[in-house]
Image: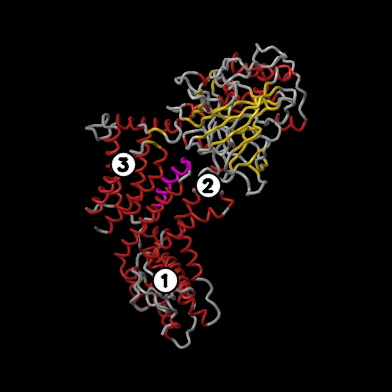
Amino acid sequence: MSGRARLALCSAAATLLAATALLPLVKPATWILQAAILLAIQTAVGAAGRRVPLARPLTVAVQALVTLLLLTLVFAREQAVAGVVPGPDAIRHLGELLQAGGDDVGRFAIPAPLSPGIRLMLVGGVVVIGLAVDALAVTFRSAAPAGLPLLALYSVAAGLGDGGTGWFWFLLAAAGYLVLLLAEGRDRLSQWGRVFGGTPRRPGNVAGGLESERGGAVAPVRTGRRIGALALGIALVVPLALPALDGGLLDGTGGGAGTGPGGGGTISAVNPLVSLQNSLNQPEDREVMSYRTDSEEKQDLYLRIVSLDEFDGTAWKPSVRRISDVPSPLPEPPGLSGDVRRTEVTTRISAADWYAQDWLPMPYPASQVRIDGRWRYEPVGRTLVGDHGQTTRGANYQVTSLIVQPTADQLANAPEPSRDFAREFTRVPESLPPVVAQTALRVTEGSANDYERAVKLQDYFAQNGGFTYNTEVSAGSGSAAIARFLEQKEGFCVHFSFSMAAMARTLGIPARVAVGFTPGTPQADGTMSVGLKDAHAWPELYFEGVGWTRFEPTPNRGTVPDYTRADTPAGTPSDPAAPSQSASTAPSAAPSQSESCTAQQKKLDGCGSTPPSDAGGSGSGGPPLKTIFLIALGVILAVGLPLLPMLARLRTRSVRLGSPGRTQADAAARTLAAWLELTDTAWDFGIAPDGSQTPRGTAARIIRLGRLDPPAAESVQRLAAAVEQVLYAPQPQPVAGLAEDVRRVRAALSASVSRRTRLRALLLPRSTVRIVWAVSDRLTSLRIRATAAWPRPGKQRPSESG
């Protein structure tokens, strides 16, 4: 097999290895076989085009045409002319499939079903990336830039996947890229001969190529493997050793919370409401967890994950809080007095093996939690958060909690909270549109106290305000999204809970938003099953003497608390035997009461990974800072990495052509450096060095192959004469103007070659391979020293033998 054919196979293999990172995103994974077949045909077409040979751009064009025909045959056969030629109908059908695929990506959580649109996006994306890699690495013989398309393919999977086994997919993609580089290196070695074939570089060998002054060269193939292994090791190990990186690029759910193993630390949450529509629109309601409780009122047992208590105008999110070790028992709930009726219940919860939530779902308010693992306690929200990667995946735990049953009179006669407390939880941003406060005043007109205002707000959204529940409405939590929701009166639990909490705050009622699950569906064995669609968000309002109190403004979702019912007599406790109005008890054909999704749930097909930082994605807030940082870092890497050879070459040239020095030794070193810069410059423009020739022979060769004009030829001859004087004269004398001679020759070589060769010499100079040689020599030297210092068992040092 020829070197070019082997390189083409490696190119296709590298693309497939990078594409395997997409496998966890979609089930079933049969699409990868289809992509492999199309990629093989595309590679064969490219190999045939290069063998003819066709012009390079024409080879790529033929491959692109065949790729389009193949995609048409597979995905638009019925609409195509003769089943393969893409006419207008076929193009329109492919466009509709891509649009449907984009919609499916937005609707479904991971792993998404393999719909026709998603299949086209996956298969088409892989073959397009494969075409780019083949064109760069094989047709245009530049394997290094081919890593960018492969990086793009892996980055899509890394950005969407759960990251739990991200290191494995990274290793596969990196292995494919290294194999591609190795194949290209072997192909180049076979063409460039012994100069690049690992010939020894002897000390003082300055004839022609002026090689390194160190001996003991190692074959570049072996060197490439070492450098690749070193780079891969650094990429995997260094991020893990730096705490500030929270586990590195390949980390899964993140570092959890806390700054160390002690009892201090802070927590700053990430978004748990990434996309509620994805959960509610899933084709199947996947079980997130099941639980058994001794509570008589199972339909009031909401499983709370975290509370969002800061509204900055862009989104609701949790404040940055101090965390500590989990106390046992937990402190008394804030604001709850002994006069309010309460019942203590015990709940045993089992989380699904696939459900990886950083925050622990549990009834509110919990008084004691028994769970194994590394968990920390946040006292303001009374929540538990996993520390340094701890999640709920497969967890079994027991929670003792209180069912608080205040009366309407207790809520109506609640005293004012402290000024500092009220100031913190009634803060609204200046960007909040006036219509929010105006609507709140209009709806609650005539109310005598905050309790009546809260009930009127709940009834306005749930009953008499004309609002419609619709999961297809664009999500949003910012100020503009709330105003738009009040105008359009259509949305789902994010809109209802965020809007009621914001309106309550404008009325001076402390409010926040809770995220978690509704109680779920009763099972025949007495347990409750909580599904993917039971995710939910609801407002909590604070009443002194009762504490944080749940309200339910979302129509037909969850249960309306007894203390907010109009028919509940004032001054009497809620009837614990009253039937619950919960959507969870509806037949399975009806949607579960759910709607709040976490970042990890979107990735794992369920509600749960990381805490909130901003909710939703309404367009009023923009992307989070982490996303902006990662995108900026990706852009910097994508732009900077290809420029590294050029920057290294510019630095080397600047050092070599620097000041001439003051002593004879300095002059000799500068003369040899200028000669090395000349031969490397010629090498960059396609004149490979020949270590078998003398400086004068090398000069003649550069003049002949470079077709240099007389001034440039004279400069080359002066440089060769200066090198001969340094090598052979008893007392070498410094020669002035060598740097200017090198620059003159470089300008002449640049003027005599094509634009493509000039661009190659600038961006991918061949002489940068000397960096690899230098690193290889250094590693070899270190290895020799280590072997000499610590000989292997059973072997003696030379001085100790015989």
Mark 1, residue position: 678
Mark 2, residue position: 632
Task: Judge whether residue 152 is colored magenta.
Answer: yes
Residues in magenta, as a range: 147-162
Instruction: In the rendered view, tell whether residue 603 sits above or below residue 474.
Output: below
Q: Nearer the viewer, mark 2 or mark 3?
A: 3
Dividing the picture into quadrants, the one containing residue 62 is top left
Residue 607 at what x, y percent from top left?
52, 33
Main SS of the magenta part reads helix
Residue 206 at what x, y percent from top left?
40, 77
Location of the C terminus by quadrant is: bottom left
Mark 3, residue position: 33
Q: Nearer the viewer, mark 1 or mark 2?
A: 2
Check disc 1 and report its element: helix, strand or loop: helix
Q: CA distance from mark 1 to mark 2?
A: 38 Å
**Dot 1 or dot 3, earlier in sequence:** 3
**Dot 1 or dot 2, earlier in sequence:** 2
Residue 537 at what x, y percent from top left?
58, 27
Q: Describe residue 219's horizontal placement relative to residue 81 as left or right.
A: right
